[in-house]
Image: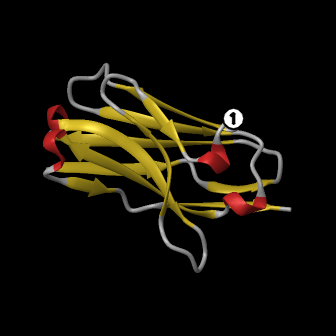
Amino acid sequence: QVQLVESGGGLVQAGGSLRLSCAASGSISSINAMGWYRQPPGKQRELVATITSAGSTNYADPVKGRFTISRDNAKNTENTVYLQMNSLKPEDTAVYYCNAVVWGGLANYWGQGTQVTVSS
């Protein structure tokens, strides 16, 4: 089992920045990729960015050049993934969810979500 706890959401003006954090605990050695997804109001959940255990990253087109995903695997008992969000736009408003996928894709874990609101 893997537990994910997100933090760092909030209200920010357009053009501002926020940094989201997601701490993974439990069976962290089983984790391959981690990532961030978001669900805007009235819409389906969508990919934001992912990062593998080897550090390979992938970004959705709307956030390329503005968001940066990174990962800290230094602790033996916890992995942390970050999402640095710059040049925020009102359309970035959403609940942001942390995700972890274990090796082989046999299990998929989600955090509880953190609200990001960007005012115009």
| Residue 79 percent across, percent down from the top left | 31, 32
> Most extreme residue toward the front, as rendered?
61
| Residue 68 percent across, percent down from the top left | 58, 33
> Most extreme residue toward the bottom, as rendered?
42
- Note whether 119 is above or below 57 in the view shown: below
- Note whether 69 is above or below 2 in the view shown: above
Q: Residues within 10 Å of mark 1 (few under 14, many from 20)?
A: few
- Residue drawn at x 43%, y 50% is 6
- Residue drawn at x 32%, y 22% is 54
Identify the coloring: secondary structure
Label 1 secondary element? loop
- Residue drawn at x 52%, y 60% is 38
> Most extreme residue toward the top, as rendered?
74
Does 63 sit left or right of 28 as displayed?
A: right
For the C terminus, the quadrant is: bottom right
| Residue 33 percent across, percent down from the top left | 31, 38
Does 5 sit left or right of 101 as displayed?
A: right
Q: How many marks are shown on the rendered structure? A: 1
Q: Quadrant of residue 113?
A: bottom left
- Residue drawn at x 25%, y 50% is 3
- Name the residue tied to disc 1: 65
| Residue 12 percent across, percent down from the top left | 75, 54
Does 22 sit left or right of 15 as displayed?
A: left
Pick whichever, 14 or 26, lies toward us.
Answer: 14
- Note whether 21 is above or below 12 in the view shown: above
Q: Quadrant of residue 86?
A: top right
Q: Of the residues shown, which amino acid type is indicated by label 1?
A: Gly
